[in-house]
Image: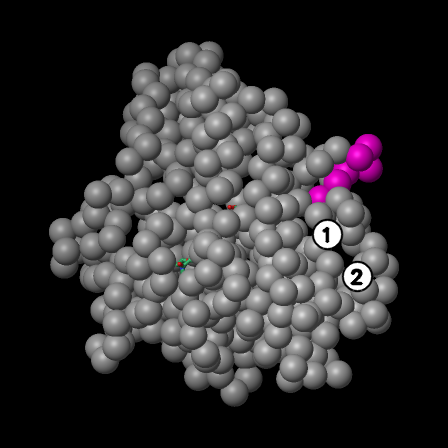
């Protein structure tokens, strides 16, 4: 008998009808002779609704209370799903993250899982029950409710699969697998039947929200067999593999993009040793992560220095930079929130030169200007004007031969929010 952990996202449990369908799928998995542990998200739109309620009271609500609030969404889903299972004669028990004891650190809204006590779950499984666990939440050492960051139910599922040594962790969502790029933006995107763990990690960290990055990290660390599948139709989905052998190695496996960064440029900084550290030091002291960094060649002892941060951190980073720039005698600080980052990811890049040239040429042909570039072994990222983001993703998808000209991608549900 195998143990399967299944996770159903917001759209998949977005209505009573859909919850009933999920119950049917779980029953089928059990009837095939498996033990099943299920992780569910809040019904689609619910987490955003809850955040909206808090923000209507205060623009900056206390982090602790936000987590208490946001964690309620998943509690609704677990109970409804357990009710739907019981109705079908399937013994089921629902648990919040705190009841299971998913122990996290105390970083509200982005807590990390430290330990899982899977005892309750094992006992229930032994009694023939389906266990339904609320995703996205845990408890810190002092007993405070914490949440794991947007998309965090993926991480709950993978972490549970690791703790229970499950045979497979199945992430059911509103697309039928991992695609070459977001099929909502590029209808010609192709489903990948397999993708390496390393590539998935890059795609997730560069903005493909199909899996939360920490879920992929966890899967890598504990070697959890992970698969992304559709809640709405049959199929094999996409397997995240740990071996590269036997895989055809296309130059590019996928394209990720991200609108959630902003750019800050310091113009006319005196070009002397220690400048980068004096600008970025105070930014990182404020716990703000810097992504891309570019320093221009200096002319007449002056240079320009540009970096990007998450949009959430932009206002604060801009203020800090303006203060530092004044101290350094820089000419001006300018910010730009209208940027988009596009990244090509592929293990095939390692053994092939010329990917960058092909990328830049494809963008040039569309008249798109590149503002920043960064590369690593298996990815190339560029920052461009946000206006051209979708056009650029499509152009690159075509230029690298990724288009599927036969079938349009199947994407379920209108709103893409959980
Ligand atoms: P869930 O609520 O099930 O967790 P998400 O909205 O978090 O679902 O993630 C699924 C969405 O991820 C898809 O609807 C799709 O728009 C988006 N997405 C982004 N990049 C990709 C990709 N490369 N492959 C598949 N889906 C992607
Ligand atoms: N409900 C949470 C969110 O919307 C967690 C999740 O869906 O994975 O981000
Ligand atoms: Mg998600």
As helix, strand or loop, the secondary structure at mark 1 comes to strand
Callout 2: 10 Å neighbours few (<14), some, many (20+)?
A: many
Front-lying residue, 50 or 322? 50
- The answer to whether residue 286 is above or below residue 146 is above
Magenta stretch in the rendered image: 138-143
Query: How far apart are the alpha carbons under marks 2 and 1?
Result: 9 Å
Asked whether disc 2 touches disc 1, contact meaning CB atoms under 8 Å apart, the reply is yes
Residue beneath the point at 26% across and 49% down: 389
Can you see residue 43?
A: yes
- The answer to whether residue 171 is above or below residue 154 is below
Quadrant of the rendering where the N terminus is positioned: bottom right
Is the residue marked 1 within 8 Å of ligand 2, measured from its CB?
no
Residue beneath the point at 52% across and 60% down: 19
Residue 396 percent coordinates (x, y):
26, 63
What type of secondary structure mainly makes up the magenta span? Answer: loop
Residue beneath the point at 59% across and 78% down: 28
Tally of numbered tags: 2
Return the mark for residue 95: 1
């Amino acid at each position: 008998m195998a143990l399967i952990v299944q996770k159903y996202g917001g759209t998949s449990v977005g209505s009573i009808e859909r919850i009933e369908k999920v119950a049917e799928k779980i029953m089928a998995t059990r009837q095939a002779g498996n033990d099943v542990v299920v992780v569910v998200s809040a019904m689609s739109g619910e987490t955003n609704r809850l955040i909206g309620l808090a923000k209507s009271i205060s623009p900056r609500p206390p982090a602790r209370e936000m987590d208490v609030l946001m964690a309620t969404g998943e509690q609704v889903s677990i109970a409804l799903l357990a009710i739907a299972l019981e109705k079908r004669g399937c013994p089921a028990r629902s648990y919040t993250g705190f009841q299971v004891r998913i122990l996290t650190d105390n970083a509200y809204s982005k807590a990390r899982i430290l330990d899982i006590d899977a005892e309750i779950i094992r006992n229930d499984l032994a009694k023939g029950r389906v266990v339904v666990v609320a995703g996205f939440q845990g408890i810190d050492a002092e007993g405070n409710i914490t949440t794991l960051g947007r998309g965090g139910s993926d991480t709950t599922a993978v972490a549970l699969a690791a703790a229970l040594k499950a045979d497979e962790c199945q992430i059911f969502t509103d697309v039928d697998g991992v695609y070459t790029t977001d099929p909502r933006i590029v209808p010609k995107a192709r489903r990948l039947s397999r993708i390496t763990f390393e590539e998935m990690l890059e795609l997730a960290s560069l903005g493909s929200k199909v899996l939360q990055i920490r879920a992929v990290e966890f899967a890598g660390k504990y070697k959890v067999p992970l698969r992304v599948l559709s809640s709405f139709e049959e199929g094999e989905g996409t397997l995240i593999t740990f071996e590269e052998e036997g895989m055809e190695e296309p130059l590019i496996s996928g394209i990720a993009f991200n609108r959630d960064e902003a750019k800050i440029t310091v113009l006319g900084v005196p070009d002397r040793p220690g400048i980068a550290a004096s600008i970025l030091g105070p930014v990182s002291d404020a716990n703000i992560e810097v992504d891309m960094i570019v320093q221009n060649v200096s002319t007449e002892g002056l240079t320009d220095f540009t970096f990007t941060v998450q949009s959430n951190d932009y206002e604060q980073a801009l203020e800090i930079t303006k203060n530092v720039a004044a101290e350094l005698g820089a000419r001006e600080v300018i910010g730009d929130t209208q940027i988009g980052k596009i990244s090509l990811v592929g293990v095939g890049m390692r053994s092939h030169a010329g990917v960058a040239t092909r990328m830049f040429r494809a963008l040039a042909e569309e008249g798109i200007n590149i503002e920043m570039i960064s590369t690593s072994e298996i990815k190339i990222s560029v920052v461009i004007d946000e206006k051209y983001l979708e056009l650029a993703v499509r152009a690159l998808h075509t230029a690298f031969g990724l288009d599927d000209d036969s079938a349009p991608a199947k994407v379920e549900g209108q709103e893409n929010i959980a």
